[in-house]
């Protein structure tokens, strides 16, 4: 049916087209969901800043969190233990593709936006 050797090779074309379209729709929706997640994270930061009326304190907390993350042992110490990879303990180098697939915006951007909000209060 899919790799048909028979006379009716044209019958598989619509199936392959449907598979290709489904894959494209899935990839696009996956990326849109990730973008929505990043947007919601920014919105949560803004909402927290409005509730607390203190965006500087929130930015400080984010800095402390990011400092704590940087204190994780070097990847060389953990990469030999493959089970640690499953828990996302090892920090991943983030490039363009990594940013595209991430669910949270970069910590620096979040802190930057909170600092911009500081002047509104």
Image: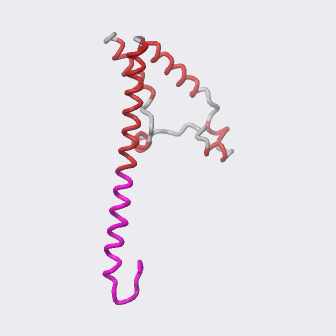
Q: Where is residue 32 in the image (x, y as percent from the top left)?
A: 35, 44
67 vs 120: above or below: below
Total numbered badges shown on the rendered structure: 0
Furthest toward the front, the residue is 51
Looking at the figure, which quarter contains the N terminus? bottom left
User: Which residue is pictured at 51% across the width and 18% down the height?
Assistant: 61
Residue 17 is one of the magenta-drawn residues: yes
Give the camera-side residue of 85 and 27: 27
Quarter residue 85 falls in: top right
Q: Is residue 61 left or right of residue 20?
A: right
113 vs 15: above or below: above
Q: Position of residue 7 (x, y in %)?
A: 34, 90
User: Which residue is pictured at 46% across the width and 39% down the height?
Assistant: 94
88 vs 28: above or below: above
Q: Position of residue 19 (x, y in %)?
A: 37, 66
User: Which residue is pictured at 34% across the width and 51% down the height?
Assistant: 28
Quarter residue 90 falls in: top right
Q: Which colour scheme is used?
A: secondary structure
Residue 25 is one of the magenta-drawn residues: yes
Segment colored magenta: 1-28
Q: Which SS type dominates the magenta stretch?
A: helix
Quarter residue 36 falls in: top left
Furthest toward the bottom, the residue is 7
User: Which residue is pictured at 55% across the width and 22% down the height?
Assistant: 67
Q: Where is residue 5 in the image (x, y as percent from the top left)?
A: 40, 87
Give the camera-side residue of 69 and 35: 35
Looking at the figure, which quarter contains the C terminus? top left
39 vs 29: above or below: above
């Amino acid at each position: 049916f899919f790799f048909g050797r028979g006379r009716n090779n044209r019958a598989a074309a619509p199936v392959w087209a449907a598979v290709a379209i489904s894959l494209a729709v899935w990839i696009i929706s996956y990326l849109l969901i990730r973008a929505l997640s990043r947007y919601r994270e920014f919105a949560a930061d803004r909402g927290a800043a409005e509730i607390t009326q203190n965006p500087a304190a929130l930015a400080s907390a984010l800095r402390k969190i990011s400092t704590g993350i940087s204190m994780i042992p070097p990847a060389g110490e953990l990469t030999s233990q493959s089970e640690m990879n499953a828990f996302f303990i090892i920090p991943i180098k983030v490039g363009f593709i990594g940013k595209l697939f991430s669910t949270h915006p970069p910590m620096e951007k979040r802190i930057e936006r909170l600092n911009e909000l500081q002047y509104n209060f």
